[in-house]
Image (tube, helix red, strand yellow):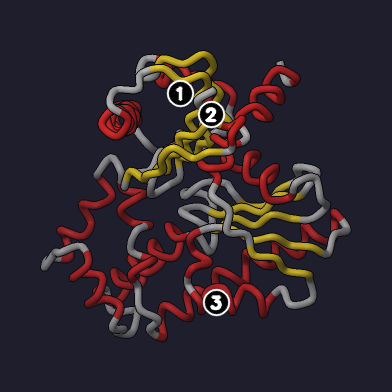
Amino acid sequence: MIALGIDGGGTSTKVCLAIPDRKVVILEFSIPCGINLTSTPSDIQLEILNKIRDEINRRTSGLEFFDSVIISISGGGSSSRRLNFKNLVSTVFRAGKIIVLSDIEVLKEIVLKGRTGILVICGTGSIAISHTGKRVGGWGHLFGDEASAFSISLEIFRRFFEYIDGVEEYDKIFDVLLNFYKVTSVFDLTTIQLESDFKRKIASFTEHAPLTPLVRKIIDEQLTKLTQKISYLASTENVSDIYYFGGTFKNEYFTQVFCKKLHRFNLHYSDIKPHVELALDAPHFLEASKNNT
């Protein structure tokens, strides 16, 4: 059995090809473009899928059929969006079975493994979800996602434009912002919001933002709001264990503040690779999909 696992995050898409019954990983790679079913246009989705197929063909001397393709995808909370994406995947990959799952549900299953607790994800977006499926946050880049890479960068953008308008004090992060996007004009910076992958481009800045006083302040403000929501969820679910995962936790200061604000809970960091888990544990996900139909 050859299984293909794909984890479509907000800023990158990670891929694993494996033989599950032997627990052997054939290859792993990443495409520096994310797929989010709520913000990535279908033509970009198709382009990324074609890149994955072509890279696999190149590395495997033309492998064209997979026993299973299992995909964890951002923005996959809607069954209609998942179905539309599955139909798109079927035009690219020849497979015995194609399964498209919500990235949140996949991570909850992989990280919690049936244990009681709360999973907090801070990547391009943010959400906290309990073992029962009750959640806070995760309302998307327009309505929430505090303490996510997108939300932190977006607030830096806002503060920069407020500085231009004379209502915010200067911070060195503003010069870094202009240099990162290689623009010299304020108006050039505003054109990012017109690009099809604006969410990825805005979120990508957080990883490169130095910890200036303003950046620290923004992280503190956003984590205050997110951890208040997490504490509320923990109280309603009567749990004391919190598991946290996501690229934003690679920032040491971010993690320190997060842990300090939730110090009364038992905190567990998870560094799993969802794309690898999807491929190696393909039989489990295939069986689970049968039980859900």
| Label 1 or label 3, whichever comes before in sequence order | 1
Residue 20 in the image: above or below residue 274 = above
Q: Amino acid at mark 2?
A: Ile
* Residue in front for this viewpoint, 224 or 1: 1
Q: Quadrant of the C terminus?
A: top right
Q: Answer above or below: position of 92 versus 18.
A: above
Closer mark to the observer between disc 1 and disc 3 = 1
Q: Position of residue 190 (x, y in %)?
A: 23, 56
For residue 93, side relative to residue 251 (left or right): left
Query: Foreground residue, 159 or 80?
Result: 80
Q: Mark 2 and mark 1: span between their CA atoms? A: 12 Å
Percent coordinates x, y for residue 265 in the rendering: 78, 71
Q: Quadrant of the N terminus?
A: top right
Neighbor class of circle 3 (other Cα within 10 Å; few <14, some 14-19, many 20+) is some
Mark 1 Cα-neighbour bin, 10 Å: few <14, some 14–19, many ≥20? some
Residues under labels 2 and 3: Cα distance?
37 Å
**Secondary structure under the numbered disc 2 in the rendered image:** strand
Q: Along the polypeptide, which appears first: circle 2 or circle 3?
A: 2
In the rendered image, which quarter is residue 170 located in?
Answer: bottom left
In the displayed structure image, the side of residue 154 where residue 71 appears, left or right: right
- Residue at numbered disc 3: 220
In this rendering, would 89 be left or right of 112? left
Query: Which residue is tagged 1?
Result: 85
